[in-house]
Image (tube, rainbow, N blue to C red):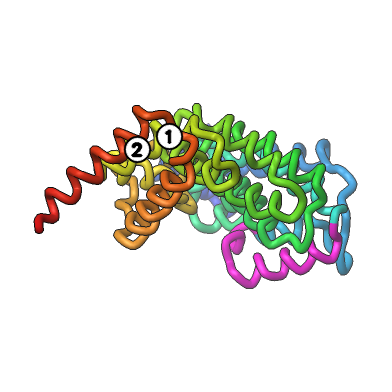
Amino acid sequence: MKARSRSCDASAALFCAHSPDKPARFGVLLGLAVIIIIGASALLTAKKEPTYKNKTLSKWFYGQKNDFFAESKMLAADDAINALGTNALPFLFANLSAQGDSALYFRIYRLTPGLFRTLLPYPISGDDIHWMALTHMRSFSSMPSNAVVKLSRLVPGLSNPALRTFGLQIVQARASEVAAAPCIMLCQDLLADPSSGVQLVAAIMLAQLDHTQTKGFPILIAAFTNQQQLDSALSSTRYRLQQPPGGWTNTSAAMPPVVALRQATQRAILMALEQLQPNLDDQQKALIRGYDSASAGKRGP
């Protein structure tokens, strides 16, 4: 038999052994394999979900995936979640531990040619899913006390420090509706968080909730007396949407703190120190006086 012609028929053109565009061909094959795997996984793991207006909660939450961050989709999901009430909470809690798409899938999606890319689900990181779940919890009309307690236990396990900060803020807002105890316990746990930014937010909040809790004093005084340390802490608490998995660890992509945010945080630290002062020991009070004197000397007469 004669060697095959270099011109393959139309149906096999994309996969022709003589095609010069091998990366594109590889991307197509990889994309098709991913489509098959995702489809099979969806069938195997499908679970009964609450529905609203004949759509599952997943459809409201994720939309078409490529519109995951669209404001209109998020508002519609808020309406569905609030209509479902506490029946929506198990779904939201489950999505706080969702894995999201891997860094490999993000690369596969980018390598897949446009025609086949439209057949692939839009890649969404686990962090963005967690952010979305927390965002909907924030706008939830009412959260029972047991759900607030559950959220407070899940927050320390979130991998992104900005999301731990966000979760803490939601627990604080929700705890004020029921009881402060879950938030106080969460703040105490987060004083030992790996992120200095999370530690700082927890220390400020703890002082506001309970003036007798002075364990956060070293964190407060360090951030108040060192602007560089404060800026570093604040940069880790600002969430960046649509980063690939682990993208928040890229220090070169860290966002510089907004001046207004820095000033507001400094005021919050000062207020926290004032609230704690009656319960501080003499050494701690002397540190505050020493800094106040140094600051007055810098300002001059």
* Residue 219 position within the rendered picture, expressed as x and y whole percent measured from the top left: 40, 34
Report the amino acid beneath label 1: Phe
| Residue marked by disc 2 | 221
Are dots 1 and 2 in contact, CB under 8 Å? yes
Please tell me the numbered disc located at residue 300: none
Q: Most extreme residue toward the bottom, as rendered?
A: 72
Pointer 1 residue: 217
Q: Position of residue 218 (x, y in %)?
A: 39, 31
**In x, y percent, where is residue 126?**
59, 42
SS class, disc 1? helix
Residue 109 counted in the magenta span: no
The 10 Å Cα crowd at callout 1, few under 14, some 14 to 19, many 20 or more, is many
Query: Visible in this render: residue 224?
Result: yes
| Residue at x-position 38% and y-position 50% | 270
Q: Main secondary structure of the magenta part?
A: helix
Q: Position of residue 109 (x, y in %)?
A: 51, 46
Q: Amino acid at mark 2?
A: Ile
